[in-house]
């Protein structure tokens, strides 16, 4: 069964957690004891309706403040698809949490309040979704019940957001009017908005086409682990385990191994369930080659005539996540890119990007917590990468503090820097 990962974002009180709670409740994917606990908590809080937001706002601080702080992951399925939800926070101070939660999403749902329209936070979330190159974006205009399910108000909000979105790189944009509190257009079509002719939110999530979103052209297989069983039965077995980051691999394919450049062909593709005649991203497999080549963790198996960029100088966009130190010219860090980890130094901070106004501050000399900027890095050993817009797996990385081993940044590769 196909899986869809989606992230939700929105301003405070726009109803993200309520929407997810409604999805879980109306698809009957929560346990009775969970529902009873939520109903008891709702009574204690004195709310008029059962507070479905409590199904996702798990942190005590979130419940007390009525805001989402951490990324809450929830799982549910329908007969058509499995879903992983990342409920991401809306506040500027939790930008790093949104970047983390949305980085692997196939689709993003940006919620906004029909009464308030498009706010600065709504624009920021849309921009981050486009920056992270999430292929599909849904604008859910929530709380339609509070504007009497007015079509004219929905069209106003829709046009306002479309005007802003035209400045961004968004390939697929869908607008859906909903009331998360009452369930209108969430799982089932709303009887209160007969003027809306589109699908319900769940129907759209079930039907949106994601099979072609991944890069199935450029074969990329970062080696994670070399398998050499220490037994007489498998004494001649040598396999390379990892997760395919792009393209399609088949037995018999000619391949090149980076950084050595040695060539061979695929002998077999193995899994716990047996050999495969074809494997593609994001499958985890073990690849065996017809020739014995010195291959280790961090090497990349690809096609001879379709290789990634190999460079020590990379042009990136970085979201800085550290509370302790800022990122500036001369900063030294570890870069973890696919299965390869190497040292790196910041050569230049080209600009700091204001994610609210999209203004580029070229005078800035460092990035602070939750800030995003364009940065040139030089790595100790070459990385084998594609531009992030071409392949999100081989075009992304994380930055690690060498002293503490703490993740302090996440980045997207724009290309090789000159």
Image (cartoon, grey):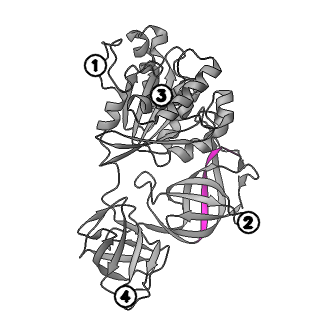
Residue at disc 2, secondary structure? loop
The dot on residue 197 is 1
Whether tag 4 and tag 3 are in contact, CB under 8 A, the answer is: no
Using residue 373 as the reference point, say whether residue 134 is left or right of it.
Answer: left
Question: Is residue 12 visible to us here?
Answer: no
Which residue in the protein does label 3 denote?
19
Marks 1 and 3, Cα distance to the nearest angstrom?
20 Å
User: What's the residue at 65%, 49% (across, down)?
Assistant: 320
Q: Which residues are magenta?
A: 369-380
Q: Nearer the viewer, residue 276 or 42?
A: 42
Q: 297 above or below 352?
A: below
Q: Residue furthest right?
A: 324
Percent x, y for residue 302? 36, 71
Mark earlier in primary sequence (3, 2): 3
Label 4, on which residue? 292
Which mark lies nearer to you, 1 or 3?
Answer: 3
| Whole-number angstrom distance, CA of label 1 to CA of label 4 | 60 Å
Residue for badge 2: 403
């Amino acid at each position: 069964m196909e899986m869809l990962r989606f992230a939700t974002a929105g301003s405070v009180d726009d109803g993200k957690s309520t929407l997810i709670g409604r999805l879980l409740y109306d698809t009957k994917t929560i346990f009775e004891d969970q529902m009873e606990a939520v109903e008891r908590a709702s009574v204690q809080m004195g709310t008029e309706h059962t507070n479905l937001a409590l199904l996702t706002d798990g942190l005590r601080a979130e419940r007390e403040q009525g805001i989402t702080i951490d990324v809450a992951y929830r799982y549910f399925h329908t007969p058509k698809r499995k879903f992983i939800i990342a409920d991401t926070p809306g506040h500027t101070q939790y930008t790093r949490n949104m970047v983390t939660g949305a980085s692997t999403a196939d689709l993003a749902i940006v919620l906004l309040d029909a009464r308030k329209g498009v706010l600065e936070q709504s624009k920021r979330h849309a921009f981050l979704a486009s920056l992270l190159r999430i292929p599909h974006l849904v604008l859910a205009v929530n709380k339609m019940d509070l504007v009497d399910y007015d079509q004219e108000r929905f069209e106003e909000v829709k046009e306002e957001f479309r005007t802003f979105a035209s400045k961004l790189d968004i390939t697929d944009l869908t607008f859906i009017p909903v009331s998360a509190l009452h369930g209108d257009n969430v799982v089932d079509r709303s009887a209160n908005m007969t003027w809306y002719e589109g699908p319900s939110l769940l129907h759209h999530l079930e039907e949106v086409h994601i099979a072609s979103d991944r890069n199935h052209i450029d074969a990329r297989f970062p080696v994670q682990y070399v398998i050499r069983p220490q037994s007489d039965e498998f004494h001649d077995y040598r396999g390379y385990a990892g997760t395919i980051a792009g393209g399609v691999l088949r037995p018999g394919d000619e391949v090149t191994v980076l950084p050595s450049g040695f060539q061979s062909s695929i002998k077999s593709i193995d899994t716990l369930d047996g050999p495969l005649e074809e494997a593609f991203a994001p499958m985890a497999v073990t690849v065996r080659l017809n020739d014995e080549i010195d291959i280790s963790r961090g090497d990349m198996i690809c096609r001879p005539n379709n290789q990634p960029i190999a460079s020590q100088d990379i042009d990136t966009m970085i979201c800085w996540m550290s509370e302790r130190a800022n990122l500036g010219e001369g900063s030294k860090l570890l870069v973890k890119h696919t299965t390869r980890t190497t040292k790196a130094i910041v050569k230049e901070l080209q600009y700091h990007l204001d994610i609210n106004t999209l203004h580029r501050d070229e005078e800035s000399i460092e990035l602070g917590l939750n800030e995003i900027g364009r940065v040139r890095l030089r790595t100790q050993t070459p990385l084998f990468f594609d531009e992030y817009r071409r392949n999100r797996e081989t075009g992304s990385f994380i930055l690690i503090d060498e002293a503490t081993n703490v993740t302090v940044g996440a980045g997207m590769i724009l290309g090789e820097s000159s």
